[in-house]
Image: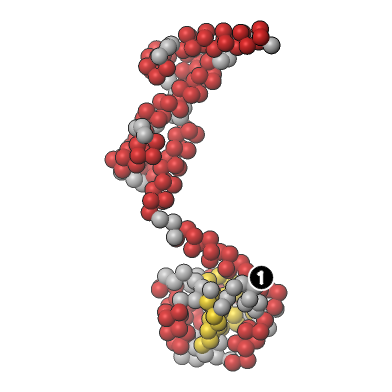
Amino acid sequence: MKAIIIDDEKHVREGLLLLADWDRFHVTTVLEAADGHEAMDLILKHKPEIIFTDMNMPRCDGIELLKKIHTTKLNAKVIVISGYDDFKYTKNAITCGGFDYLLKPINPTELNDTIQRAITEWKEQNKAISISPVEKEKNTVQQIEEYIRLNFREDIKLQDIANRFFLSREYISRKFKQEYQETLIDYVTKVRMEHAKQLLRNPVLKIYEVAEEVGYQNDKYFIKVFKKMEGITPKEFRNITAKKIYDNNRRI
């Protein structure tokens, strides 16, 4: 891991070099620059993960440097350091993507805590960026599957899911079948039948109540779908299940 310290005052750069616990954070290279122009050359060449920059510098100050770093889309955490407790600098640092803002004189504990947080966040973001397209596709399909399990009682339509996840119907259908070996609509039906079988174990519930609970307003259609999926009607399933429970209780 690399870092760079940008400040026109040499003693400030030397102070940061001494105050930061680089070994603890596995920072093996610490670069130095006296102004923003010199810094940008080093940043583009070495791509440091952690960037310290002063605000008040000649030629290219901290605000201008932050804007340049922001436009390059570098995956780096910028820690702004300044002796000016001025909201203008703080606001610009935040607007341009500064991770944190520290005032001189630097407190060693605060400095190292800030470095720790910056590195932790950098690692998390880097991990997210490195996820392969295949994994992203798989994650999206898993999110759709989770959505189905949470909303199976609703009238789920393929177009509604496509709109919700900003994907085409064709793409969702293809990827979902690759992942779960069945169509999305068949999967919705399977989830509904799983819950229906659980509800049918309760003898108090009417068949039409079970149908409504799993998303069917027409109990006759529910019975038809259930028989197609399970090979028996909901009533037959209930009777068979009740007999199994009775026989098990007798053995006990």
Q: Nearer the viewer, residue 151 or 43?
A: 43
> Does 252 sit above or below residue 188?
above
Residue 24: x %, y % from top left: 65, 73
Q: Amino acid at mark 1?
A: Asp
184 horizontally vs 55: left or right: left
> Does 37 sit above or below residue 51?
below
Q: Nearer the viewer, residue 118 or 95?
A: 118
User: Which secondary structure lies at badge 1?
Assistant: helix
Quadrant assignment, res 143: top left
228 horizontally vs 108: left or right: left
Residue at 46%, 12% (x, y): give it: 234
Categorize mark 1 by other alpha carbons within 10 Å: few (<14), some (14-19), many (20+): few
Residue 193: x %, y % from top left: 45, 22
The residue at the far front in this view is 251
> Does 129 sit above or below residue 22?
above
Residue 61: x %, y % from top left: 49, 85
Residue 112: x %, y % from top left: 66, 73
Residue at 41%, 46% (x, y): give it: 138
Q: Quadrant of the C terminus?
A: top right
The residue at the far left in this view is 170
Residue at 49%, 63% (x, y): give it: 126
Mark yes or no: residue 55 visible: no
Q: Nearer the viewer, residue 81 or 179?
A: 179
Quadrant assignment, res 169: top left
Tally of numbered tags: 1
Task: Name the residue carrying label 1.
Answer: 113
